[in-house]
Image: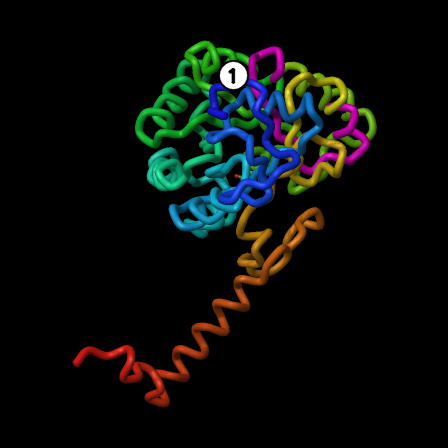
Amino acid sequence: MTDLEPDAPLSASGVDVQHPYRAANGPKRVRTRHFQGAKAQGIPITGLTSYDMLTAQIFDAAGIDFLLVGDSAGNNVFGYDTTLPVTVDELIPLTRAVARAVTRALVVADMPFGSYESGAEQALATAVRFMKEAQAHAVKLEGGKRSQEQIQRIVAAGIPVMAHIGFTPQSEHGLGGHIIQGRGDAADELIEDALAVQDAGAFAVVLEMVPSSVAARVTARLAIPTIGVGAGPSVDGQLLVWTDFAGMTQGRVPKFVKQYADVRSILTDAVQRFTADVASGAYPAPEHSYE
Ligand code: KIV
């Protein structure tokens, strides 16, 4: 089966040797239309952030459906306190590395704060940079109704857009901190935002830190898939920040994160054994040395 066949499932029965958790007859390359097919067939979509070639290769080979080169690179690569300072120029080389590393996953480039808010033309110019200079397959931007024109303009130019509503980290100061969105009366507003990005042509929408019941309502109302980040189980896909999911992050991680590995401890232990071996002379041994 080629990736041109519209109904290739993202995953189902059958085992692909290279991608054990993916369907043997699934798409060779995940396209935005496969997101649509996955929602129609009730097959959950999976995504992780990635900011470099090595993690992108590992996640892609393990069968992840999409990789987001998130503006969370601001925190996780560049060491800023928030995502606000990270720039397009900083994200483009990371996106290029991820796009070059994958063979199957869809690569989504996150448009950072300040790169699309001025209007549709600014948004298109930024999206074009990510597609042309970094070979992204799609872009993501934050905002519902307020970003509708930007999404329309980018989509009209043939660039797929993943929208992002609920808690939008670029607005953390405006929102008053890391606060769950869509509770109580705000649920209707969230649904309006979701419909607005769908009408504007987004192929999927990220719901971040939204009550499960509200995410379920949004998912039922939309034809496009919802991708949850702290939005409970009743969405069409799940996305996690890889440094949280792999136990790389120091300190508290959000309640919605499930830690699938403890890479920080593994690396700490490796470094401690290396420094001890060098101190004791156990490394390098003869087998690590040239005659
Ligand atoms: O940049 C990022 O990692 C994100 C996800 C949290 C949705 O935008």
- Seen from the viewer's position, the closer of residues 33 and 252 is 33
Q: Which residue lies furthest to the left in this view?
A: 291
| Pointer 1 residue Cβ closer than 8 Å to ligand 1 | no
- Seen from the viewer's position, the closer of residues 24 and 184 is 24
* Magenta stretch holds residue 209: yes
Q: In this view, does 77 lie to the left or right of 34?
A: left
The residue that mark 1 highlights is 151
Q: In this view, does 241 lie to the left or right of 93?
A: right
Q: Position of residue 149 (x, y in %)?
A: 52, 12
Name above or below for residue 170 compared with residue 18. above
User: What's the residue at 81%, 25% (across, down)?
Assistant: 185
The image quadrant that residue 199 belongs to is top right
The image quadrant that residue 222 belongs to is top right
Q: Dividing the image into four equal quarters, which quarter contains ligand 1?
A: top right
Which quadrant, please, contains the C terminus? bottom left
Residue 49 appears in view: yes
Q: Which residue lies furthest to the bottom in this view?
A: 280
Start-end of magenta stretch: 197-218
How many numbered marks appear? 1
User: What's the residue at 64%, 32% (across, down)?
Assistant: 227
The image quadrant that residue 8 belongs to is top right
Q: What residue type is labelled 1?
A: Ile
Q: Where is residue 163 in the image (x, y as percent from the top left)?
A: 57, 24
Q: What element carries label 1?
A: helix
User: What's the residue at 72%, 38% (across, down)?
Assistant: 180
* Magenta stretch holds residue 108: no
